[in-house]
Image: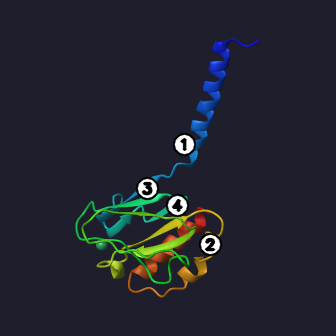
Amino acid sequence: MWSALKKAMFALAIGLSFIGFATVSIAEVHEVQMLNKHPDDKKKRNVFSPALIRIQPGDTVKFISADKGHNTESMKGMIPEGASEWKSKVSKDFEITYEKPGVYGYRCTPHAALGMVGLVVVEGEGWDDNLEAAQSVKQRGKAKKAFEELWAELEATN
Ligand SMILES: [Cu+2]
């Protein structure tokens, strides 16, 4: 026969293991800095850092206006079908929660042609369904090279 204490401890252990399990699935908040200069390479100006971020459905990305003059805006043809577009105000922090797996290409409206673009990848079933479509969007100026580097980084870390 178990003592009342043993029973209580057993119940507590079960309870704690459920809490531990639940913690794993709690949505996370990821930060992306909007910067005038790359933290590791001062020659790179106007950057999102990190420019490529992988998250889980339900996670939030917080874009931090660390330096003024930047924003974040989803790009036409570069987000999954049915996902919501976004456009933040310049020089303001901005938060967005992503539910649908897929790739989400975005830019800084004033600096897109200078290569200030980024990629959010929401992992999960069908995440690469819109990959080809996003990659085939025509890019202007330095955004072309910037996205080529992001696609390469994405492929290298798959
Ligand atoms: Cu910018």
Tell me which corner region of the image, top left, top right, bottom left or bottom right, holds residue 109: bottom left
> Where's residue 121, x and y in %?
53, 66
Q: How is the rendered protein coloured?
A: rainbow
**Of marks 3 and 4, which one's residue comes earlier in the chain?**
3
Q: Residue at x 42, y 74 (%)?
A: 106
> Where's residue 152, x and y in %?
55, 71
Q: Is residue 125 something one can see in this rendering?
A: yes
Name the residue beneath numbered marker 2.
128
> Where's residue 80, x and y in %?
55, 76
Q: Is residue 37 something one can see in this rendering?
A: no
Tell me which corner region of the image, top left, top right, bottom left or bottom right, holds residue 43: bottom left
**Of marks 3 and 1, which one's residue comes earlier in the chain?**
1
Instruction: Choose mark 4 or mark 1, whichever is in front.
Output: 1
Q: From the viewer's perspective, is 153 left or right of 140?
A: right
Q: CA distance from mark 3 to mark 1?
A: 16 Å
How many marks can you see? 4
Tag 4's secondary structure? Answer: strand
The answer to whether 21 is drawn above or below residue 100 in the figure is above
**How many neighbours does mark 2 have within 10 angstroms: few (below 14), some (14-19), or many (20 or more)?**
some
Q: CA distance from mark 2 to mark 4?
A: 12 Å
Q: Identify which residue, 6 or 155, lies in the foreground.
A: 6
**Of marks 4 and 1, which one's residue comes earlier in the chain?**
1
Tag 1's secondary structure? Answer: helix
Name the residue beneath numbered marker 1.
23
Q: Which mark is residue 54?
A: 4
Q: Amino acid at mark 2?
A: Asp
Q: CA distance from mark 3 to mark 2?
A: 21 Å
Q: CA distance from mark 2 to mark 1?
A: 27 Å
Query: Are the residues at dot 2 and dot 1 in contact (C-beta closer than 8 Å)?
Result: no
**Of marks 3 and 2, which one's residue comes earlier in the chain?**
3
